[in-house]
Amino acid sequence: MVASCLLISLNNSPSALYKLQVHYKRGRSELKKVLTVCPYCGSGCQLYLCVENNRVVGAEPANGPINEGELCLKGYYGWDFLNDTKILSKRLTKPMLRYNRNESLHEVEWDEALDYVADRLKAIKEKYGPDAIMGTGSARGTGNETNYVMQKFMRAVIGTNNVDHCARVCHGPSVAGLTTIFGSGAMSNSIPEIENADCLLIFGYNAADAHPLVAKRIVRAKQKGAKLIVVDPRRTEAARISDLWLQLKNGSNMALVNSFANLILAKGWQNDKFIANFTEGFADYRKTVEHYTPEYAQSITGIDPKLVEEAMKIYTHSKNSFILWGMGVTQFGQAVDVVKGLGSLCLLTGQIGKPSSGVGPVRGQNNVQGACDMGALPNVYPGYQAVTDAANRKKFAKAWGVDQLPDKVGFTITEVPHAVAAGKLKAFYIIGEDPAQSDPDSAGLRKALTDLEFVVFQDIFMNKTAHFADVILPATSWGEHGGVFSGADRRFQRFRKAVDANGDVKDDWVIIGELAKRFGYELTYKDTEEIWNELISLCPSYAGATYEKMERQGSVLWPCRTKEDTGTDYLFKGNVFQTASKKGIFFATAWRAPAEVPDEEYPTVLCTVREVGHYSSRTMTGNCWGLSKLADEPGYIQISEEDAARLGIEDEELMRVTSRRGSVMSRAKVSDRVKAGAVYMTYQWWIGACNELTIDNLDPISKTPEYKYCAVKLEAIEDQAQAEQQLVTLYDNMKRKMGAEVSNIK
Amino acid sequence: MEKLSPFVVGDGEKCIGCKACEVACHVSHNVEGITAGNIDTPVFPKLFVTRVEEVTMPVQCHHCEDAPCAQACLEKAIYFEDDKVLIQTEKCKGCKDCLVACPFGAVELVPRFVKGKEVIQENLGKPVLYGNKCDLCYTREKGPICVETCPQQALRLVEPHKEKKEKNKKAVATIIGMFKK
């Protein structure tokens, strides 16, 4: 897939072209293009990296199945972090270690670092047992093979199911909820099918900011005549072009979903034949939703019953209706229930098991689907095979050459602070995650990281979490290694190495393998394809998805069971579900209020959201020139015109946001797209860090935190000049701590 | 008829506000660098993604036929070159009259950077500012980079004389249809 490339189309100003062509004629530089998959959101866009002298110099869209020759701004301009720009933080280029927490980390050789990690983990395992050690997979650039190797290391070598990753704080509820309802926790239909739906019910999902190339499919569906129903407290881009916008009150999802079901049944719009033949549990379901008439639900949701009727008329009467949702469903204390409620709407109406009709929990990070697929979860092996099933344990124990595997479901990452406080967890091996930035109640998490006896941190950049580590293991980045990513729609795609890494770094799976060797366990492979072949041989639903097939087809959507199988666009063909009984299981339950509701002292709701230019905890996008300069600290807080006027806050002014757990500075974005009484912040900022404020109220099943709802108070800042100065000082200090080059550029 | 100036316009039905056009615009005009990886100044796009309650779309210069910005400019730094309104930035004194005159808010005053460093007016201790606005990427063979980059194909270059002729043709087709009935 390497082709020569004479020019870079990113910047076609004649002067730039001229320079490159001159270089080429002098034979000074050979340019090549490497086909790969974008490292940002879960859409799975394919792009070419343009490489000159082992340095990435540009990105061009490729004709991938998702992006069809287009890219968003992150795809176009999100690659130069690879060149260690040191805008926000520095690349990790050498193992670092400290034998004592009072010392600062110092550079060491790999052997010293790995010996120390192995010795400490062995000692902790000896003293407290294997379940005192927790590990993470990574949903980001490292790829499926590392996630497979990591969960194998935790299970077969350490002997615990304590392995998890950041799907927990994102679409964990979708996996848990949909598995109960349908027997499979992923998108039932592929992303390209969105544009052929006749009705899109978009629930708590802002594709324009989260997945721009999925948003394109939504816009295209609208152009092709689909009806759009959007449920969101904010006037998002989708709400703006929708046919119906249900601006519900924050935290009332379950009541609204129940009222949808109630209305459908009251009108007789349900699909009785489908219910009779393909589902279970309808009688109980009907009884539960009976209470939620649209008139009653209005007291919770604020939605006019007429709108509920109109929305459900469209949803039930359209030929193919497709429900899409995002964090607006999953990041609540009651999240799994709402997912099950949405799934049950499909069962009630038969809007599933056909093209362009079903459920679409659109996954956030580029490989969060993959980290789940690979079993970086405390309850399942790769391919969603339960650890509590003796037959599965036996199969994997045999394949991995160990006598037995642990049968107890492990800790989730959101349980870590509680497990540390209870003295149950002593060591934490973190790969490619930044919980100190991304997890709720940052102060609580910092305490947990401090109280742990041993923290290993394996990543590509310095970040907030790295400062709590005893050992830092530097890894290669996306662009410096290859493998397989899973896109949001169960799409396996090959991503490829474009450049050799600088610095004394290793591929993640190599590091884990070398560590395993120190435990006397052979976990070495010659390349990622060898890992892949091992794992697909253990997972019936991936068995036919070879590297060769991915190369040939461009991508493979699992399930793909045999050599002949080309993959599966939409699940549940013939209405055969993957539950034990092969039927869809209805579920409904009562609405529960969020944990921390506004009161006199903290009168406003804080909800955390995404913005298009930055990704995840910002270690990658914040180190890209174009993206970092587009939006910077302390980040924006979206606030209604009414609230801003009442508090005397002007657009673009700095202001203070305080909850029971913390207090931060943010910049006001006074917007007519949000309602009074609620404010919205994004989570990637160090200074305007909204997770200092959020609450770790967890969903009881998926253990996902309630990022979308906590109570805060808002205050204007009198002395703006002083606040601006303080912002610069704080930011520069943090950047220095992260090894960035602090310049005089404002 | 004199040829009317072309300009770029956004489609509010398609735009999702992703700002790919803004970064592309900056990169395209960042003459000292080669690619996005060399950007060493804050991003100063020449078009501005704007959200109001009903619509999201970028706003940029219309290259107005009467160019109120040029008429307002005392330094005569803003001028017509063929069918484009351009700014000779070295002449700009940062008086902001163009900013007031422009009906679209398409002109912005931005600090001058040389080799990644902000240029400071020594006696004032303040950065040198100049007027910045859409120049239709006139040095670029393929035309405006924003049109090319937009993943939603929400931007297009309007060429008024062509637009008019095409609409005339469409109108003829409709009128003929009317007589056939």
Image (cartoon, rainbow, N blue to C red):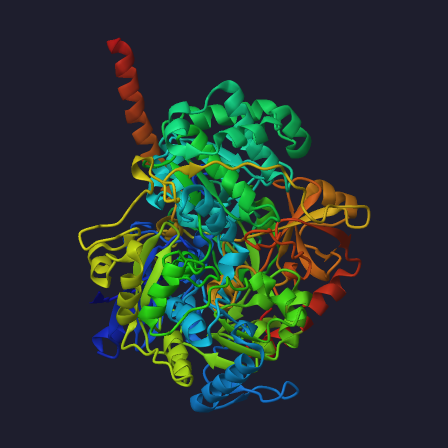
Residue depicted at 65% across the width and 57% down the height: A696
Residue A13 visible from this viewpoint: no
Residue depicted at 47% across the width and 74% down the height: A459
Q: Nearer the viewer, residue A363 or A23?
A: A363
Q: Nearer the viewer, residue A135 or B132?
A: A135
Q: Nearer the viewer, residue A26 or A499?
A: A499
- Quadrant of residue A33 within the rendered picture: bottom left
Residue A700 lies, with reference to residue A538, above or below; the image says above
Q: Residue A382 in the image: state x and y as whole percent.
A: 37, 61
Q: Residue furthest top?
A: B181
- Quadrant of residue A527 within the rendered picture: bottom left
The C terminus of chain A, quarter of image: bottom right
The N terminus of chain A, quarter of image: bottom left
Residue A53 visible from this viewpoint: yes
Residue A27 lies, with reference to residue A308, above or below; the image says below
User: Total marks drawn?
Assistant: 0
Q: Residue B131 in the image: state x and y as whole percent.
A: 54, 57
Q: Residue A250 in the image: state x and y as whole percent.
A: 64, 41
Horizontal relation, residue A649 to residue A607: left or right = right
Q: Residue A516 in the image: state x and y as whole percent.
A: 40, 80
Horizontal relation, residue B114 to residue A675: left or right = left
Q: Residue furthest left?
A: A564
Residue A376 lies, with reference to residue A600, above or below; the image says below
Residue depicted at 62% across the width and 27% down the height: A291
Q: Residue furthest right?
A: A600
Residue A272 lies, with reference to residue A648, above or below; the image says above
